[in-house]
Amino acid sequence: MISPKRDAVAALLAALVCTSASAQFVGSDIGVAFTPTVQNAAYASGNAMGGLQTIPFFRISSGVFDNFQITSKGGSTTAMTIYIFDTNPVSSTCTDKSAFSLGAADVSKLAMAPFILTPAVVGSGTTATVAQQTQAISMQNRDNPFTGNLYVCIVANGAVTPASTTDLVGKISGVLD
């Protein structure tokens, strides 16, 4: 027969092992959708679309970015350059319907190389067009103090008129620590 004291010690050890194991793995998948407010008016090539987007992404401090998706609900097929920053890019100009300018002081704040996405029709029965970039990039928020944000600027690569003020929908996905 096992003593109650021994049962208690065994239960405590089991609890510590389970707690230790779960503390080592705290990662979880996250997908954060955002809708930049754009104008239902003509944008010139090089104009920022919706201005700088502040995306609450990180829970603690870091994670792995693995996907960026952009959808035009109205069916635009104009290419866009996506800039993602890990620190607020205060030296750059990313104002809706104005020429984008990447400030020299903000180059080191890019979380990854800018990339170009061109939305395309994904099937019949919809007018929406979609594009995505999938890549694994380890990153963290570098604001001081920590904010947990990523910052996104979407820039038109050609003349385009969004179908509505909520035409674009972006989504950033990843795995967090």
Image (cartoon, grey):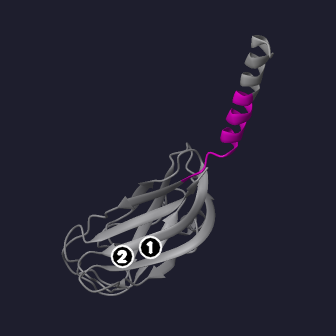
Residue 95 as seen in the image, left or right of residue 5: left
Residue labelled with disc 2? 99
Question: Label 1 belongs to which residue?
Answer: 101
- Is 133 in front, or is 159? 133
Prevailing SS of the magenta stretch:
helix
The answer to whether the residue labelled 2 contacts the one labelled 1, judged by CB atoms less than 8 Å apart, is yes
Disc 2 from disc 1: Cα separation: 6 Å
Residue found at x 55% / y 67%: 66
Residue 104 % position (x, y): 56, 69
Quarter of the rendering containing residue 166: bottom left
Instruction: Give the amino acid type for the residue marked by disc 1 in the picture.
Output: Ser
Tell me the quarter of the picture where residue 109 sits.
Answer: bottom right
Q: Nearer the viewer, residue 126 or 3?
A: 3
Left/right of residue 165 with respect to residue 149 in the rendered view: left
Residue at far front of view: 1
Residue in the picture at 34% in, 87% down: 158
The residues colored magenta run 14-28
x and y percent of residue 76 in the render? Answer: 28, 83
